[in-house]
Image (cartoon, grey):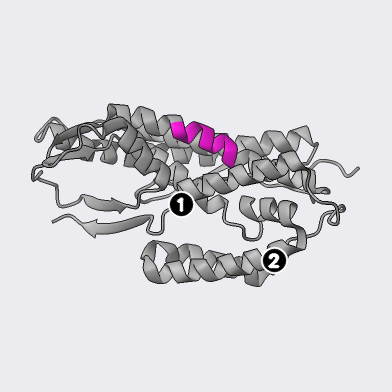
Amino acid sequence: MLPRRRGRPWLNLLLFLLTIGSTTFFGALHYEGFALAFEPGAAPTTLWHGLWYSVTILTILGAHELGHYYACRYYRVDASIPYFLPAPFLTGTLGAFIRIREPIPTKRMLFDIGVAGPIAGFAVAVPALFIGLSLSLVLPTRTIPIPDEFIQLDLGQPLLYQFAIWLSWSSELVEGYQLYEHPMVFAAWFGLIATALNLFPIGQLDGGHISYAALGSRSTLLTLSTAVIVVGLAFYSTSWILWAALMTLMLVTFGPRHPRTLDHHIPLDRSRLWVALFALFMFVVCFTPAPIEITAAP
């Protein structure tokens, strides 16, 4: 057995601290926008208010990556601890990832490692969504003065997001009233979108691992079909342009075929096929054709 490669934990820690800072900063801006809804002219929010968003999104992303990490540990596959990625824009982060430093030899291991992350992240995002909605407010619709530096977001609503709103507020969302979402809701929304993106059955994404383990060589056709759909989505919503470019680059760099495992000819067992169907369910309820549109404040 080859010796395990040592990582650079200082880099993981540095990126994590930077991501705490970026998500807390933008979380404070999200909270300020929320506060304007029910208390126009209130005292400015502090950086601490950003933790509502920051802690939620980092917990969702951390759960996702630790799901992969501990699945790797279970199968003794060499993998790094999570890397968090800060970002200087609205979400405050580009997400997180782990590095798997050796090939995964069997379909069962590939499937379990691939699906563990989305399930773990989904298990945190769903209760976070309902908690955030419980902290949200339904108020009479009115024109709220918005500072010039604010940017308005038009968020696409996944099926699960719509269902949660209906379950939480349907009796109060009548004509003349509007839902003002708490920043935790935006964090949970981002967690749902990240889950859907990772479950696209392409290449080295979680969905690519899952589809190969479940479908074998037939997953190549699914990969190519999905790539065409993503390119088509880029014409429907500009929020897909970057993702379509990344998918195209991934296909050109690594090819459409998933690397074979040692047992590529052996079908996946029935219990894991049921889990694969649950992964498909997660994708469907977390997906939206127009995730985010950005408009300037009026």
Q: Is residue 33 left or right of residue 56?
A: left
Q: Is residue 111 left or right of residue 125?
A: right
* Amino acid type shown at disc 2: Thr
Prevalent SS, magenta region? helix
> Where residue 201 sits in the image (x, y, percent)?
61, 57
Q: Is residue 18 left or right of residue 29?
A: right
**Residue range (magenta):** 118-126
Q: Secondary structure at mark 2?
A: helix
Residue bearing mark 1: 287
Spatial distance from mark 2 to mark 1, Cα to Cα?
22 Å
The answer to whether residue 11 of the structure is visible from this angle is no
Q: Residues within 10 Å of mark 1 (few under 14, many from 20)?
A: many
The mark found on residue 220 in the picture is 2
Q: Secondary structure at mark 1?
A: loop
Q: Is residue 142 magenta?
A: no
The mark found on residue 188 in the picture is none
* Amino acid type shown at disc 1: Phe
Q: Is residue 185 left or right of residue 268?
A: left
Q: In this orientation, which residue lies closer to the viewer: 179 or 67?
A: 179
Q: Tell me what residue is drawn at x 29 percent, y 34 percent.
A: 182
